[in-house]
Image (cartoon, rainbow, N blue to C red):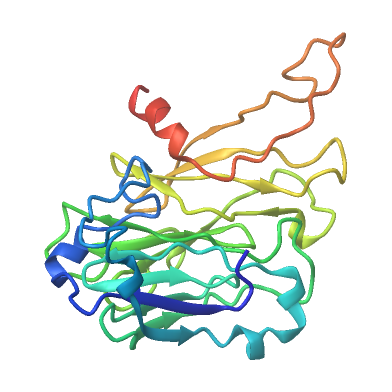
């Protein structure tokens, strides 16, 4: 687990062109299906020893969030999208870098609350790009990034500038409702990147383990990718009197951190 909060990029002296690199990792899982497979062929067992560090980027979290570092983890996988290397910090700041130089293009801070211990740490595993095919090319938020936050928000940002997409939800965000009062703010959060399919953005839930039986549901939620309008919800584990005969034991809840496995269900209706 990386806790240094240092983005170190390794490059070859004879690097591929930007066009080749752009096709290399445009989604958190490599592609929309999350196969985590790359077609890249320039780095081989024979030349891996020639790799050199090209540049290093520091997020500054060690200083800005010194008191919360022990309750955090850097687990982000950057995406390479429209000429930028984009990732999120454990405190949900989204950073876009020049992939060749490591220079910061823009940075967006949603200002999540700190000073407490989330059940699954302060963590953000990545962002999800999406292109609105119905929007004019080059327009604000024609290409956007989605990210779930530690305080259970779904954000939509313009991929080129990092500005919130104001037409999405309220001022570029929607809030996931846990359906009950929380024991503390960190009991319910979103840790993994959303998925997008057929114009619908889908988020999972991350629930603190072993605190209570009657915990918030690990609901999977879907929203219109343009407007943020709620589309549907799915509870992967039935619970409560409405789901169980009285003779059955309570089943508790289950986190649904990622949402890739829900894509097939969404597309099949």
Compared across the picture, whether 191 is left or right of 52 comes to right
Quarter occupied by the C terminus? top left
Q: Nearer the viewer, residue 46 or 107?
A: 46
Specify the quadrant of the image occupied by residue 216: top right
- Which quadrant would the N terminus be assigned to in this image? bottom right
Q: Position of residue 163 (x, y in %)?
A: 36, 76
Please tell me which residue lies in front, 175 or 104: 104
Q: Position of residue 91 (x, y in %)?
A: 60, 73
Residue extending furthest toward the bottom: 63
Residue positioned 28% across, 39% down in the render: 198
Nearest the eye: 141 or 236: 236
Measuring 59% from the left and 51% from the top, which residue is drawn there?
176
Residue 263's place in the image compared with 69, above or below, is: above
Q: Residue at x 55, y 38 (%)?
A: 220
Residue at horizontal 39 percent and vertical 60 percent from the top: 168
Compared to residue 13, the image places residue 31 above or below, namely: above
Q: Quadrant of residue 101?
A: bottom left
Q: Position of residue 153 (x, y in %)?
A: 56, 59
For residue 150, above or below residue 98: above
The quadrant in which residue 145 appears is: bottom left
Of 155 and 68, nearer the camera is 68
Residue 54: x and y, percent?
A: 33, 83
Count of marks overlaid on the render: 0
Above or below residue 185? Residue 58 is below
């Amino acid at each position: 687990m990386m806790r240094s909060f240092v983005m170190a990029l390794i490059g070859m002296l004879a690097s591929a062109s930007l066009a080749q690199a752009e096709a290399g990792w445009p989604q958190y899982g490599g592609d929309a299906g999350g196969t985590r497979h790359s077609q890249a062929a320039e780095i081989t067992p024979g030349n891996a020893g020639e790799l050199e560090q090209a540049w290093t980027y520091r997020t500054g979290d060690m200083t800005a969030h010194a008191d919360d570092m022990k309750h955090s983890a850097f687990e982000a996988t950057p995406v390479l999208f429209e000429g930028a290397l984009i990732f999120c910090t454990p405190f949900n700041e989204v950073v876009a870098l020049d992939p060749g130089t490591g220079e910061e293009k823009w940075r967006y801070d949603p200002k999540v609350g700190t000073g407490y211990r989330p059940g699954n740490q302060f963590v953000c595993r990545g962002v999800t790009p999406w292109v609105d095919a119905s929007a004019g090319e080059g327009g604000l938020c024609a290409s956007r990034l989605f990210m779930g936050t530690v305080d259970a928000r779904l954000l939509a940002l313009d991929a080129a500038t990092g500005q919130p997409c104001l037409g999405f939800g309220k001022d570029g965000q929607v809030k996931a409702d846990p359906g009950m009062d929380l024991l503390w703010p960190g009991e319910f959060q979103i840790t993994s990147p959303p998925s997008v399919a057929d114009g619908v953005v889908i988020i999972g839930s991350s629930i603190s383990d072993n605190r209570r039986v009657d915990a918030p549901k690990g609901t999977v939620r879907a929203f219109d990718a343009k407007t943020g309008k709620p589309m549907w919800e799915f509870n992967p584990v039935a619970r409560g009197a409405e789901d169980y005969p009285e003779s059955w034991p309570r089943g508790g809840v289950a986190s649904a951190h990622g949402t890739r496995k829900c894509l097939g269900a969404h597309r099949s209706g």
